[in-house]
Image (cartoon, rainbow, N blue to C red):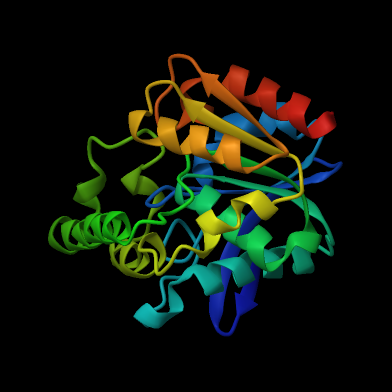
Amino acid sequence: MPQINRNGVKINFDTYGSGPALLLTHGFSASSKMWDDQIDTLSKYFTLIFWDMRGHGQTDYPNDENLYNEKETIEDIKGILNELRIEKASIGGMSLGGYMSLAFYYKYPEMVEKLLIIDTGPGFKNTEARESWNNYALKQAKKFEDLGLDGLKGKSKEMNPKNHKNAKGLVYAAKGMLTQKDDRIINELPNIKVPTLIIVGENDKPFLAAADYMEKKIKSSKKIIIKDAGHAVNIDQPHVFNEEIQKFLIS
């Protein structure tokens, strides 16, 4: 995989196909491998850019916990686009990757053609709800500290322990990237001006309400619920997912 070097941290990414650019970011404890079922179909129409977040996949796992956060993730995305000399792209992601895509739009709206938000929550306005989420994130960190990559066994399909070097990066990512500091992103939803596709699996119960909320708040959005799919709709129903992405990006 190609790499960029951001202040000593090597960020791995890969590209497929040609045409309008689409950058997709995986979820927490997943990797760029989760998009494998999208390559053959979507690379016929788009330049696909898949990458591994810090502490995931083949990207570096820096020892400094302070290097895992929303700001660094946003700049990693920008760095990849700059390396490829892409001034504007459709930006999307699944779960944490979707949240980071919203955060990227918040910082660099001029670089976003369209948004693709998959099985994602936009954060919390309520302080108690945010604290509850952060407690969950810290429990995830503790789990990987205690169990290592065995903590991924029996999890959702995109979370394959074979795709990671070790669990150290997941511990840091849970503490610094999965936790949320404020309500900036959820409050910015009404200010999103680009076409936005919100996709959620019908069995992804925790995120159905979040998808409804985003559809109401983002004026330029469209929501699709995919049947017989859970938290990783692109893996559970790849053909339906690819078809919807293709229609959305070409329209």
Split into 4 quadrants, where in the image is the C terminus? Answer: top right
Residue farthest top in this picture = 227
Left or right side of 73 for 82: right
* Residue 47 shows up from this direction: yes
Above or below: residue 78 compared with residue 245: below
Q: Residue at x 40, y 69 (%)?
A: 181
Locate residue 199, reporting x and y percent.
56, 31
Question: Which quadrant of the figure has residue 22?
Answer: top right
Q: How many marks?
A: 0
Locate residue 241, reporting x and y percent.
60, 24
Q: Residue at x 13, y 61 (%)?
A: 146
Q: Residue at x 46, y 51 (%)?
A: 96
Question: Which quadrant of the figure has residue 180?
Answer: bottom left
* Residue 63 shows up from this direction: no
Locate residue 202, reporting x and y percent.
43, 21
Above or below: residue 232 compared with residue 56: above
Split into 4 quadrants, where in the image is the N terminus? Answer: bottom right
Left or right side of 58 for 6: right
Q: Residue at x 50, y 68 (%)?
A: 70
Locate residue 60, reporting x and y percent.
47, 70
Left or right side of 76 for 125: left
Question: Which quadrant of the figure has residue 239?
Answer: top right
> 52 or 179: nearer the eye?
179
> 99 or 208: nearer the eye?
208
